[in-house]
Image (cartoon, rainbow, N blue to C red):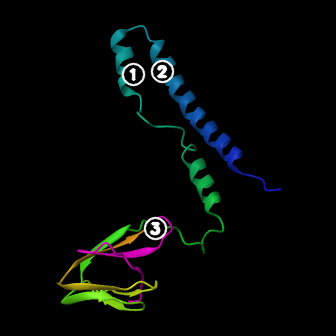
């Protein structure tokens, strides 16, 4: 049976927040008990804003370190773009299975599906390499509705 450490961490974080709130309440009660209006106003103005209990920030940091324990070797998912745009330099008239397509940005992509297309010759067509929901990459070429499945090789 797998034991989750989320409930204890949640309780710990709530307790640390409660301690900070109690400290703020004590300062408010002290200011509220003053009889002179000017002194009360000065007391409220002198209260530190957002300053909590010194140990309150340490508890979430320790809990966060505990959550990351053992993940040193696991790669974190970085934000990756969903598409890139470039051009195919020179004359382009289609592709066949296994064709390598060189882009102006220096990338080289190989057609990995069985598709082929014979197009009217185009000069420097705009292309967009897009990633679908499942992570498959497709090369969208200006002037055609066909998009071959591709894999980057360089």
What's the CA distance linking mark 1 and mark 2? 7 Å
Circle 3 or circle 2, nearest the eye? 3
Residue pushed farthest right? Answer: 1
Decide if residue 8 is on the left or right side of residue 113.
Answer: right
Q: Nearer the viewer, residue 42 or 112?
A: 112
Q: How many marks?
A: 3
Q: With respect to residue 142, does 50 lie above or below?
A: above
Residue hosting label 3: 78
User: Which residue does the image show at 62% across and 68% down from the upper left?
Assistant: 71
Residue pushed farthest left? Answer: 123
User: Which residue does the image show at 44% across and 12% down from the upper left?
Assistant: 34
Residue hosting label 2: 28
Q: With respect to residue 54, does 130 lie above or below?
A: below
Q: In which image quadrant can residue 119 be found?
A: bottom left
Instruction: Evaluate if marks 1 and 2 touch, with contact meaning CB atoms under 8 Å apart.
Output: yes
Q: Could you say whether the residue bearing mark 2 is in a helix, strand or loop? A: helix
Residue hosting label 1: 44
Mark 1 and mark 2 lie on one chain; the one further toward the N terminus is 2
Residue 15 image offset from top left, x and y in percent: 64, 37
Mark 3 and mark 2 lie on one chain; the one further toward the N terminus is 2
**Magenta-tinted stretch:** 133-154
């Amino acid at each position: 049976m797998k034991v989750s450490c989320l409930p204890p961490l949640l309780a710990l974080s709530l307790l640390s927040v409660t301690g900070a709130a109690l400290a703020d309440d004590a300062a408010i009660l002290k200011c509220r008990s003053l009889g002179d209006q000017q002194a009360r106003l000065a007391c409220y103005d002198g209260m530190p804003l957002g300053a909590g209990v010194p140990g309150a920030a340490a508890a979430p940091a320790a809990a966060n370190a505990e959550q990351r324990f053992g993940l040193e070797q696991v790669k974190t998912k970085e934000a990756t773009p969903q598409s890139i745009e470039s051009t195919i330099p020179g004359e382009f008239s289609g592709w066949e299975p296994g064709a390598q397509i060189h882009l102006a940005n220096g990338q080289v992509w190989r057609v990995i599906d069985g598709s082929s297309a014979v197009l009217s010759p185009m000069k420097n067509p705009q292309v967009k390499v897009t990633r679908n929901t499942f992570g498959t990459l497709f090369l969208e070429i200006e002037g055609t509705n066909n998009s071959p499945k591709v894999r980057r090789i360089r």
